[in-house]
Image (cartoon, rainbow, N blue to C red):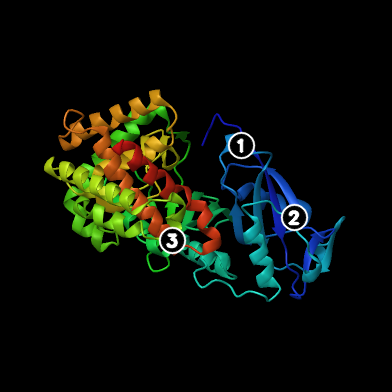
Amino acid sequence: MSTDRTPPAMRVRLVVPHVDGRRVLATGADLPSLDVVADPTTLAAAVARLPDIGLSGPVIESVIDFTRDEELDGAREAVMQLVPHDDAAADGDRRWIDWAELEPVVPHPLARVTSEIIGERRGELEPHPDRVAWARHGWYDAASTWIRRSLRDVGRAEPDAVVQFRHWGISAVMRVDAPDGRSWFKASYPRFAHEGPVTAHLAATLDAGVPSVVAVDADQGWMLVDDLGPTETADVVDQAAAVDLLVSIQAAQAVHTDTLVELGCPLRPVEGLAAELDEALGSAVVADAELTESERRDLVAAVERASDRLVDLGLPSTLVHGDFHPGNTTVTTDGPVIFDWTDASVSSPVVDFATWAWWYEHDDERQAMIWRSFSEAWQRHLGVGADALDRSTVDIVAGAFHAAGYIRLVEALEPRRRFENAAGPRHFIELIRRSIA
């Protein structure tokens, strides 16, 4: 996939336990580090460098600071915990020390994560019960075994490598390189385990526009899909085509909502969004929004009014992507493709406007282009266009949909991973506030 943006530098601090359980690899009294050039949230570049410094995978846990490029002060920070190593890992200025001697210097927001990893290794803390499977010992081997078996089952070659690409709180992605082609593995957080079955359903019912699915294990939340080949990032130039594809899929899937719900898609009708938001706003994870009871009532009342207006237009409930933005769309030689159906649900199709718009929230020209692309697609495929829909109605309904969803997601995550998605509730609560004004 090509991009015009130069990836930023990333400093990866490595937590490498000794096989004896008593020691940790250190540089002085600090954690050893590795500097790489990498896209935000992607650990593949660091994994590729490990053999160069005498270390190896798999990575047990990876946590990356998601601060936006323009807000970074220096290199992006990351912490990676590796499987235990033996004495050979000590090399040059790296040496084995007792865990008690380790005094790491790790900046916020990764200081808490690092402290907890070390605390668990020292026996001072128990692993959190909500820890995702891919941050546990043995998961990589189990997933790799499933990948190899799945490829054999469809007559594919054994992979040469299964490369950890991105591991964070809600998913793990690995690149699978084989002599007869590349594929991609994804493990989804339990509440998103329907991504594999939904993607397979779309691949079976559509002519194009979604990845080709090789295998799915719904119980594990695992999915293996074919590589898309040469691609370009979907941006403003081909934005209209990507938006048109999404809305055409939504129009086609309106008759499959029962199937989608059976596959695990949450049913979130517009009529229930006000009550859903009201309940979610009582969560402790949005305490920093500092909503008074009066403001909370005003937000909920505005959502109820906007939802009623939307219902009156007769838009169908259908498949909602839930995280539709340029990073989850791409353009192949055959046209646009939409992937990452992690947040798929059944609701009003208009809620997908807000996530694409978020990518360009400070660019008025692009915002206007995005609204025009959606309005034209809604008119073409759903019979409702800009003459019937006003943006404030869409933003209020979409804001409620995404704010409530993000709040419940953040609540469900292990506390030390919550910062990765903490911007979501804040952004969409503010979107409702602005739209009311």
Residue at the disc numbered 3: 284
Of tags 2 and 3, the one toward the viewer is 3
Q: What residue sits right under mark 1 in the picture?
A: 7
Q: Does residue 237 appear in this view?
A: no
> Of the residues shown, which amino acid type is indicated by label 3?
Ala
| Residue at 34% across, 25% down | 368
Work out whether mark 2 precedes mark 3 in sequence or the reverse, and give the earlier one.
Answer: 2
Q: Is residue 30 left or right of residue 396?
A: right
As helix, strand or loop, the secondary structure at mark 3 comes to: helix
Residue for badge 2: 105
Instruction: Residue 232 in the image: state x and y as whole percent.
Output: 46, 33
Taking the image as shown, residue 20 lies to the left or right of residue 214, namely right
Number of other residues with Cα within 10 Å of mark 1, as a class: few under 14, some 14 to 19, many 20 or more: few
Query: Compared with residue 18, is residue 204 higher up or lower down, i.e. above or below?
Result: above
Q: Position of residue 195 (x, y in %)?
A: 37, 56
> Element type at marker 1?
loop
Q: Earlier in the sequence, mark 1 or mark 2?
A: 1
- Give the mark toward the camera: 1 or 2: 2
Q: Where in the figure is residue 430, as x and y percent of width and height?
A: 39, 42
Pointer 3 local density, CA inside 10 Å: few below 14, some 14–19, many at least 20: few
- Residue that protrudes farthest toward the right in the picture: 92
Label 3 near label 2: C-beta < 8 Å? no
Seen in the picture, residue 232 relative to 127 is either above or below; the reply is above
Task: Tell me the quarter of the picture where residue 160 sits.
Answer: bottom right
Q: Secondary structure at mark 2?
A: loop
Q: Quadrant of the C terminus?
A: top left
Nearer-N-terminus badge (3/1): 1
Calculate the distance from the C-alpha at mark 1 to the C-alpha at mark 2. 24 Å
Residue at x 82% of width, y 60% of height:
29
Tell me where residue 275 appears, x and y as whole percent. Answer: 25, 57
